[in-house]
Amino acid sequence: MKLPTTLPAWQELQTLAGNPTPHLRELLADPHRAQRMSATAAGITLDTSRQRLTPAIQHALLELAEQSDVAAQRDAMFRGDTINTTEDRPVLHVALRGDPLHAGPWGNAVQGDVHRELARVCEFAQALTAGAVLGFSGEAITDVVNIGIGGSDLGPRMAIDWPPPPCPASACTASPTRTPGLCGACCAGSMPDAPSSWSPARLSPPRKR
């Protein structure tokens, strides 16, 4: 895959970034802007008309995607090709979100494994919200802290913040990393009976020697 910073479209975007951008009021004066700056797919509409995005910038961004072979990489992912070169395997994001009754090129075995694990996650979540999952003290677990190691915490955070609360009896928080300050803020108010040694500093990764 080509490095984006080496491509002509990137240079064009750098040039455009150095130019003054019109005020949003001027951009919205175009009666066809909303139509031109919107796209709909799979029931989701992306509307960038109220951003300070000019047609020239939009064109350069699309050119960058084309010059970076984004479409080819997308198609390779959908085919189940080995595009995770670090681990030498397919990424299988599509299998995770796919139809359990229609397996993709990765086969029925992978699709079956994925949906069995999703069913286990759902079963655990239901047991947790019902107060049936006990902790080390023998009491029901009431606090869940998601730590986004290796991935964004935005998905869990959205699920937590989405009304109505998924479970009034459970406190759920999300931390994007193991950073002591963030973890400490997320855990504040949780585990009231925990020993005093459970400080934010103890949540930091060990130092390399």
Image (cartoon, rainbow, N blue to C red):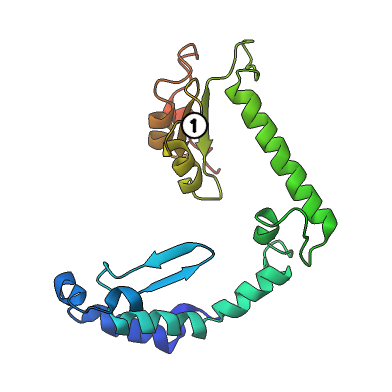
Classify 11 as above or below 94.
below
Res. 177 in view: no
- The N terminus sits in image quarter: bottom right
Q: Position of residue 183 (x, y in %)?
A: 44, 33
Q: Quadrant of residue 55?
A: bottom left
Front residue of this view, candidates 52 and 29: 29
- The C terminus sits in image quarter: top right
Direction from residue 112 to residue 72 in the image, left or right? left
Q: Position of residue 115 (x, y in %)?
A: 74, 47
User: Outermost residue, bottom direction?
Assistant: 8
Q: State how many labels appear.
A: 1
Q: Residue at the spot x=65%, y=75% of the render?
A: 75
Q: Amino acid at mark 1?
A: Leu
Classify 153 as above or below 199.
below
Q: Quadrant of residue 131?
A: top right
Q: Position of residue 186 (x, y in %)?
A: 42, 31
Q: Quadrant of residue 109?
A: bottom right
Front residue of this view, candidates 152 and 110: 110
Direction from residue 56 to residue 130 in the image, left or right? right
Q: Which residue is mark 1?
A: 203
Res. 27 in view: yes
Classify 38 as above or below 154.
below
Classify 199 as above or below 35.
above
Front residue of this view, candidates 186 and 180: 186
Q: Residue at the spot x=34%, y=86% of the render?
A: 12
The crowd level at tag 1 (other Cα within 10 Å; few <14, some 14-19, many 20+) is: some
Q: Position of residue 168 (x, y in %)?
A: 47, 23
Secondary structure, mark 1, is: helix
